[in-house]
Image: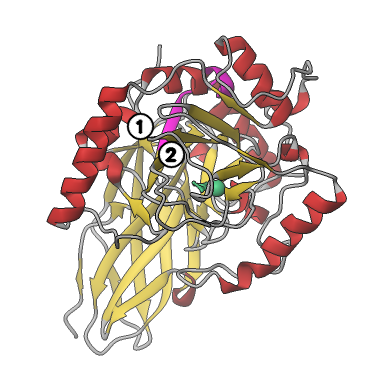
């Protein structure tokens, strides 16, 4: 008998290791000297799934693997879910990971509607490593985002803060974005910039000066977390989703991103469509030629592009195949007659975009000009949240409930 060791299975996409909701990625590490895994059997509650090891395992080093799979917790009753994972090897040996308990809670009205849709569609309760749009009933599902189907009252296109929350909602529904009435306070911007610069110096955050590189994880800094949780944003999103918002990530930019025009949908993908929003905060007055954010007003109503439909494989680091996606977005903007508008934000202004709005970063014509900004993406708690391009479950942090 060879010596196989396994580490406890962890929840890969939630900060809370005991409670979970939505699409939950689970991951266990194992060392199996001289052995190659062939089959993985996952049992969750009264469901079980058998996978080829190639569809669940990532080889980390010789004899060392990650076993990764996803549990669609919408398809399990609220309460304690027991997860067992066993592995079969080429020589017939077997090993089991330690049993894992997760407290599942999908109690919102949206989560319950999603459960019904997934049951009717036949979504597998346990999915191998890669999650795909075909797992979810985008065509036949009954649950639609209310803001995508209710007739919207036209409001004039406006790139200044809305006078009140109600107007902001109408602008978002009609044009695919809005600017909130409330600004981020100057002191918080100052505090955040100072903290980011310290964290870059100490190596806590990674950034190469002068580049368009996005700084990841600035929400782990106290000031970043305050921006993530900024109450006017959370209240707005709760009203928009009619469900609690959960924060996915932050991307902090010192300079313009120069990102091509895109829908976020293919990268930050909700089921049902619509239940994700981007929140872009200017941390300084935007200067001309600095690589300004641009949007195509109204483009949120264009068809959503999905990796499968474009024939794109799941990607990890190399997005070169996504030229096809860029070309398709470009074609839709030209054929639909959508106009590109640059957003000359004032420091502290908060722009919210609809999941499917086409946007991007202009070319940095003047490389000496910074464009300090932070963008966060949020999903509705009751939705299924994943990254279609990567085939991964989305990382979500449950923030304190918004009243
Ligand atoms: O800040 C930008 O230039 C674009 C960022 C963006 O597209 C995003 O974070 O979704
Ligand atoms: Fe984006």
Residue 69 left/right relative to 3: right
Residue 21 left/right relative to 140: left
Q: Nearer the viewer, residue 379 or 225?
A: 225
Residue 45 falls inside the magenta stretch: no
Residue at the spot x=25%, y=71% of the render? 30
Q: Nearer the viewer, residue 115 or 282?
A: 282
- Element under label 2? strand
Q: CA distance from mark 2 to mark 1?
A: 7 Å
> Would you identify the image quadrant in which residue 43 lies?
bottom left
389, above or below 198, in the image: below
- Element under label 1? helix
**Residue 181 percent location from the top left of the image:** 51, 15
Please provide the residue range marked out in magenta: 239-247
Query: Could you tell me if the residues under marks 2 and 1 are in contact, i.e. CB atoms within 8 Å?
Result: yes
Residue 114 left/right relative to 146: left
68, above or below 320, in the image: above
Q: Which residue is mark 2?
A: 376
**Residue 265 percent location from the top left of the image:** 61, 47
**Residue 63 percent location from the top left of the image:** 26, 83
| Quarter of the C terminus within the rendering | top left
Residue 241 falls inside the magenta stretch: yes
Q: Which mark is residue 160?
A: none
Q: Which residue is mark 1?
A: 228
Residue at the spot x=56%, y=12% of the render? 165
């Amino acid at each position: 008998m060879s010596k196989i060791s396994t580490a406890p299975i962890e929840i890969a996409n939630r900060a809370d290791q005991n409670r979970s909701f939505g699409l939950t990625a689970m991951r266990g590490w194992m060392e199996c000297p001289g052995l190659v895994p062939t089959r993985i059997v996952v049992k969750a509650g009264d469901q079980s799934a058998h996978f080829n090891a190639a569809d669940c395992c990532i080889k980390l080093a010789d004899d060392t693997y990650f076993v990764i799979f996803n549990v669609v917790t919408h398809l399990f009753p609220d309460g304690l879910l027991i997860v067992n994972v066993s592995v079969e090897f080429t020589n017939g040996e077997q090993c089991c990971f330690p049993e894992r308990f997760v407290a599942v809670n999908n109690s919102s009205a949206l989560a319950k509607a999603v459960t019904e849709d997934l049951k009717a569609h036949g979504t597998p309760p346990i999915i191998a490593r890669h999650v795909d749009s075909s797992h979810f009933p985008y065509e036949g599902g009954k649950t639609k985002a209310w803001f995508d189907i209710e007739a919207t009252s036209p409001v004039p296109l406006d790139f200044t803060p809305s006078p009140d929350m109600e107007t902001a909602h109408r602008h978002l529904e009609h044009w695919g974005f809005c600017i909130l009435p409330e600004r981020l306070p100057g002191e918080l911007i100052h505090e955040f910039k100072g903290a980011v610069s310290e964290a870059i110096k100490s190596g806590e955050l990674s950034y190469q000066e002068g580049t368009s590189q996005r700084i990841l994880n600035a929400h782990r800094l106290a000031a970043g977390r305050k921006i993530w949780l900024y109450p006017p944003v959370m209240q707005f999103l709760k009203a928009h989703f009619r469900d609690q918002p959960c924060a996915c990530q932050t991307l902090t930019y010192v300079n313009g991103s120069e990102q091509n025009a895109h829908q976020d949908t293919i990268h930050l993908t909700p089921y049902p469509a619509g239940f994700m929003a981007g929140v872009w905060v200017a941390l300084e007055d935007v200067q001309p030629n600095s690589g300004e954010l641009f949007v195509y007003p109204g483009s949120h109503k264009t068809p959503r592009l999905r990796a499968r439909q474009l024939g794109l494989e799941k990607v990890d680091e190399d997005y070169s195949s996504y030229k096809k996606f860029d070309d398709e977005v470009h074609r839709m903007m030209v054929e639909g007659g959508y106009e590109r508008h640059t957003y000359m934000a004032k420091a502290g202004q908060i722009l919210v975009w609809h999941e499917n709005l086409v946007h991007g970063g202009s070319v940095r014509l003047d490389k000496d000009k910074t464009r300090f900004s932070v963008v966060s993406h949020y999903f509705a708690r009751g939705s299924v949240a994943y990254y279609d391009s990567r085939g991964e479950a989305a990382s979500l942090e449950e923030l304190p409930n918004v009243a």
